[in-house]
Amino acid sequence: MGGRLFTVGEGVEVPVPAPGEVWAVGAVVLGRDGRAFAQKRSPDRRLFPDTWDVVGGHVEAGESLLDALAREIEEETAWRLRHVRRFLGTSDWTGDDGAGLRHEADYLVEVDGDLDHPALEWSKHSAYGWFGPGDLARLKHNRLPGEFLVHDLIARALREHPDTAQDFTPCSASAPARDRE
């Protein structure tokens, strides 16, 4: 992206990938009511088919992690990254697509756009929902024990940052926590 159109909170960590490493980024987007957005990957996807996921994806060659985060948010939802609030950590994982080890940096973010109507890539995603503490078990759908990366990430964001619902100010109110199928 040419010239950043978003801000980054003080102290937000941004890992520096080593040469040859494959990186991905993930965004936990919270709505005004404190629920987290997730989208369900289509059943025909090669990597993690028919499972819930946060907004994000692979970092392209020559792209910074935060620029990749902004690009993925816009590509997957048509929302615009406004502010990177917190670094939620990194994880290492190997997908079921045979492409090997990936490193993922995840962030709590604020976006601009119509949160009631994300412009999903419907060829890649079959549904979306907003998840609060009482809805988290749904994020384990189609995953085996030990494969709860998305569940654990959103649960940690909600648990570690309970202040988020009070001082998070997205452009639009969020939709209720239910699938849009």
Image (tube, helix red, strand yellow):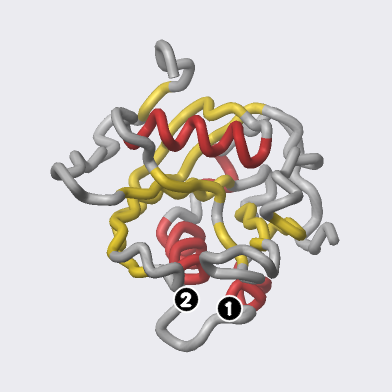
Relative horizontal placement of residue 86, taking residue 139 as reference (left or right): left
Percent x, y for residue 147?
44, 78
Q: Give the spatial CA distance, label 2 vs label 1.
A: 6 Å
Quadrant of the rendered image containing residue 176: bottom right
Residue type for callout 1:
Lys
**Mark 2: secondary structure:** loop
| Marks 2 and 1 in Cβ contact (< 8 Å) | yes
Which badge, 2 or 1, is on the more N-terminal residue?
1
| Residue that carries the numbered disc 1 in the rendered image | 140
Instruction: Identify whether 155 is placed above or below 114.
Output: below
- Residue at point 56% right, 65% down? 46
Instruction: Identify whether 6 is placed above or below 131.
Output: above
Instruction: Identify whether 17 is placed above or below 53.
Output: above
| Residue that carries the numbered disc 2 in the rendered image | 148
In the picture as drawn, the residue positioned furthest to the bottom comes out as 145
**Mark 1: secondary structure:** helix
- Residue at point 31% right, 65% down? 100
Q: How many residues crowd around disc 2 within 10 Å: few (fewer than 14), some, or many (20 or more)? A: some
Along the line of sight, the residue nearer the viewer: 40 or 140 = 40
Quadrant of the rendered image containing residue 146: bottom left
- Residue at point 59% right, 27% down? 80
Quadrant, the C terminus: bottom right
Quadrant, the N terminus: top left
- Residue at point 45% right, 49% down? 26
Relative horizontal placement of residue 35, taking residue 167 as reference (left or right): right
